[in-house]
Image (tube, coloured by chain):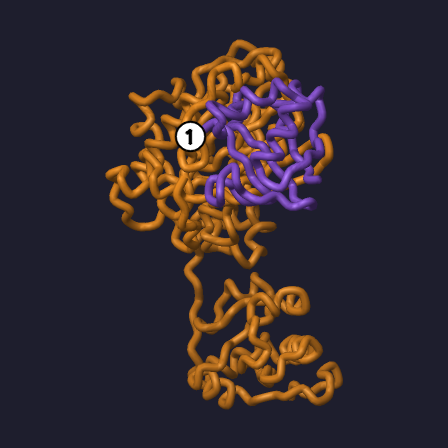
C-alpha cells in the first residue's frame, strides 16, 4: 500500500513487525517527521531528524555510517527518501519502515505521547526555537525555569538581557546601582532618552517586560561587593559578568567558585572585546588567568577610554550565547578558551587558558571541595601545568 | 621574524601599532628586541625582569607560563600575543 511511485527504487524496506523486532535488537530508530508531529507522540527510543535536515545533519546525529538504523516517518514515503539520502552519504545499514505509525502502535510497538511542557501561548511565542532539535519543548521548559543574573545593566548587560528575555529565560536578575545617563544611550540599548535619571534596573525592567511580560525581572539596586555577593548570586543558575572594574571581577570570581556558579565573562576596550566562560572546577577561573590585579592606571573604564557603541553589543551577545549553551547543556562553552574580538579588523582570535593547580580561588589548596561539576555535560579543561 | 599583537591598552607605547614584527628565537629575545624599539613597553609588561603577573603572553594560543616562560621558543611564523587583563564593561 505504501509502495507508490514516489518511493525511489532499491531502498531497503522492512515491514512494521520487522521494524519492531529490529528495534528490540538494538537498531537505532530515526524519526524523520516534523517536530510538530513528534510532539503528538513518538517511539520512545527514536531520534528526531526531520527529512529536510537529514542531508545536513545526519552525519552528526549518527557518525558511524555502518550503524544499523530503522528510519520511519508517518507512512513510509519520507523515510524512504531519507534512506536514499543516507545511502548517498555512504550509510550502508539504513532501512525504511514501510507502513504507518498507526500500524506500529496497533502491532504493539512502544509509543509515548509527551506531556505538554508549554502553554499554547508559549508554543506560539517560542515556536521558532522549539523547532531547533537542541531546544524543543524540553529545552524551552528549561529556559523558562532558568534564572540568570546580570552584573551590570549597561553596555554588555543590555544586549544580553534583551535576547535572554526575548527567548524566554524565566527570571533575569539585574545588579546595578546606577541611574541612566545621557552618555549611556550610545550603547546601553535597554535604556531610552525619556528615562535619563531613572535607576538602570527600573529602566531595564520596563524595556524587558515590554518585550516579554512573562519574564520575571528582579531588580537588585545595589553595587556588588564582598558583603552582598553570595546573597546576590546564590539563587541564580548562571552569572553574566559585565562589570567595569577589577575589584568586582575578583569578588565575583571568588564567590562564584565557592558557590559553583558558572560566570560568563565579557570585557571591552575601545575596539577590542574578550569573552570567556568560567565553569568552576571544570575549567579555569578568573584568578587562574590573572592571579593579581593590575594597577589602577592600566585598567581604565569606558568613561576614561571610550568605547565603540556596537562593541558591547557584539560582546554582550556572545555572552548571551554562552548562557544558552550552559543552560541547555549543549555545544561547547568557552571554558578554557578566551575569545578575542577585534572590531577594527573584524577578526576573532582564541587563546587557551588553563586551570592553575596553585590558584588561590579554585586550586588544590584553596580549601573548596571540588564536588559536582556545575555543567552536566562539561568536559574537563584542565591541563597539567604550574604557573 | 615573528608577529607580535599589541593589545589596545599598550598601543600608546608602539605609536598606535596593533601588530609589530620582532626578531628573536625565544620570548626573552623577542621582548628584548621590542624594548629596544619601544622602551615604554618594558615597564608595562615586565616587573624585575619577569613577566608581570597581570600580563599574559601567548605564543600562538599557548600561555608561556605553562611552557618554558621567557625561554619558550618563538618560530619565525609564530604569533606572540600580549594580553594584560581588561576591565571595561557596564558603565
Figure disc tally:
1
Task: Answer with the quarter of the image where residue A91 lies.
Answer: bottom right
Residue A241 higher or lower than A13, as above or below: above
Chain in purple in the render: B
Task: Answer with the quarter of the image where residue A317 lies.
Answer: top right
Question: Which residue carries the number 1 mark?
Answer: A173
The residue located at (45%, 52%) in the rendering is A329
The residue located at (53%, 66%) in the rendering is A38
Task: Answer with the quarter of the image where residue A8 lies.
Answer: bottom right
Front one among B72 and A24: B72
The residue located at (44%, 82%) in the rendering is A26
Front one among A214 and A46: A46
Residue at the top extreme of this rendering: A197
The residue located at (50%, 21%) in the rendering is A244
Residue A377 higher or lower than A102, as above or below: above
- Residue B63 picture location, percent across and down: 51, 41
Residue A380 higher or lower than A168, as above or below: below
Front one among A382 and B48: B48
- Residue A13 picture location, percent across and down: 61, 88
Label 1: few (<14), some (14–19) or many (≥20) C-alpha neighbours in 10 Å: many
- Residue A128 picture location, percent across and down: 60, 50
Relative to B68, is B5 on the left or the right?
Answer: right
Relative to A126, is B11 on the left or the right?
Answer: right
Q: Report the quarter where the N terminus of chain A lies.
A: bottom right
Residue A357 higher or lower than A172, as above or below: below
Chain in orange in the render: A
Amino acid at each position: 500500500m505504501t509502495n507508490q511511485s514516489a518511493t525511489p527504487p532499491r531502498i531497503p524496506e522492512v515491514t512494521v513487525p520487522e521494524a519492531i523486532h529490529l528495534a528490540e535488537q538494538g537498531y537505532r530508530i530515526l524519526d524523520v517527521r516534523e517536530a510538530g508531529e513528534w510532539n503528538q507522540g513518538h517511539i520512545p527510543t527514536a531520534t528526531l531528524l526531520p527529512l529536510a535536515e537529514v542531508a545536513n545533519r545526519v552525519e552528526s546525529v549518527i557518525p558511524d555510517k555502518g550503524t544499523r538504523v530503522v528510519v520511519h516517518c508517518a507512512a513510509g514515503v519520507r523515510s524512504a527518501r531519507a534512506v536514499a539520502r543516507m545511502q548517498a552519504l555512504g550509510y550502508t545499514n539504513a532501512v525504511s519502515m514501510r507502513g504507518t505509525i498507526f500500524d506500529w502502535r496497533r502491532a504493539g510497538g512502544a509509543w509515548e505521547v509527551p506531556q505538554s511542557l508549554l502553554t499554547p501561548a508559549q508554543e506560539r511565542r517560542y515556536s521558532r526555537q522549539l523547532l531547533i532539535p537542541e531546544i524543543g519543548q524540553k529545552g524551552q521548559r528549561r529556559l523558562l525555569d532558568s534564572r540568570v543574573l546580570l552584573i551590570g545593566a549597561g553596555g554588555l548587560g543590555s544586549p544580553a538581557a534583551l535576547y535572554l528575555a526575548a527567548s524566554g529565560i524565566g527570571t533575569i536578575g539585574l545588579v546595578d546601582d546606577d541611574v541612566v545617563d545621557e552618555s549611556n544611550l550610545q550603547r546601553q540599548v535597554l535604556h531610552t532618552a525619556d528615562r535619563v535619571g531613572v535607576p538602570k534596573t527600573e529602566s531595564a525592567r520596563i524595556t524587558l517586560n515590554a518585550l516579554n511580560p512573562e519574564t520575571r525581572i528582579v531588580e537588585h539596586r545595589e553595587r556588588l561587593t564582598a558583603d552582598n555577593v553570595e546573597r546576590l548570586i546564590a539563587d541564580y543558575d548562571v552569572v553574566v559578568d559585565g562589570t567595569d572594574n577589577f575589584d568586582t571581577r575578583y569578588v565575583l570570581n571568588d564567590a562564584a567558585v565557592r558557590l559553583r556558579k558558572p560566570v560568563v565573562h565579557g570585557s571591552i576596550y575601545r575596539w577590542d572585546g574578550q569573552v570567556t566562560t568560567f565553569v568552576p572546577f571544570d575549567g579555569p577561573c578568573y584568578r587562574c588567568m590573572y592571579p593579581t590585579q593590575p594597577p589602577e592606571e592600566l585598567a581604565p573604564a569606558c568613561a576614561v577610554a571610550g568605547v565603540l557603541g556596537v562593541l558591547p553589543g557584539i560582546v554582550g551577545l556572545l555572552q548571551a550565547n554562552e548562557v544558552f549553551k550552559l543552560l541547555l547543556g549543549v555545544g561547547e562553552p568557552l571554558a578554557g578558551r578566551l575569545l578575542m574580538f577585534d572590531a577594527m579588523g573584524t577578526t576573532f582570535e582564541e587563546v587557551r587558558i588553563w586551570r592553575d593547580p596553585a590558584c588561590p580561588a579554585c586550586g588544590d589548596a584553596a580549601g573548596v571541595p571540588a564536588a559536582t561539576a556545575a555543567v552536566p555535560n562539561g568536559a574537563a579543561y584542565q591541563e597539567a601545568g604550574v604557573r | 621574524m615573528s608577529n607580535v599583537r599589541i593589545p589596545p591598552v599598550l598601543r600608546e607605547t608602539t605609536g598606535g601599532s596593533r601588530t609589530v614584527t620582532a626578531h628573536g628565537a625565544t620570548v626573552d629575545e623577542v621582548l628584548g628586541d621590542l624594548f629596544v624599539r619601544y622602551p615604554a613597553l618594558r615597564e608595562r609588561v615586565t616587573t624585575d625582569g619577569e613577566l608581570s603577573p597581570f600580563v599574559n603572553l601567548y605564543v600562538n594560543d599557548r600561555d608561556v607560563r605553562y611552557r618554558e616562560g621567557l625561554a619558550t621558543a618563538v618560530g619565525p611564523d609564530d604569533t606572540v600575543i600580549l594580553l594584560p587583563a581588561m576591565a571595561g564593561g557596564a558603565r
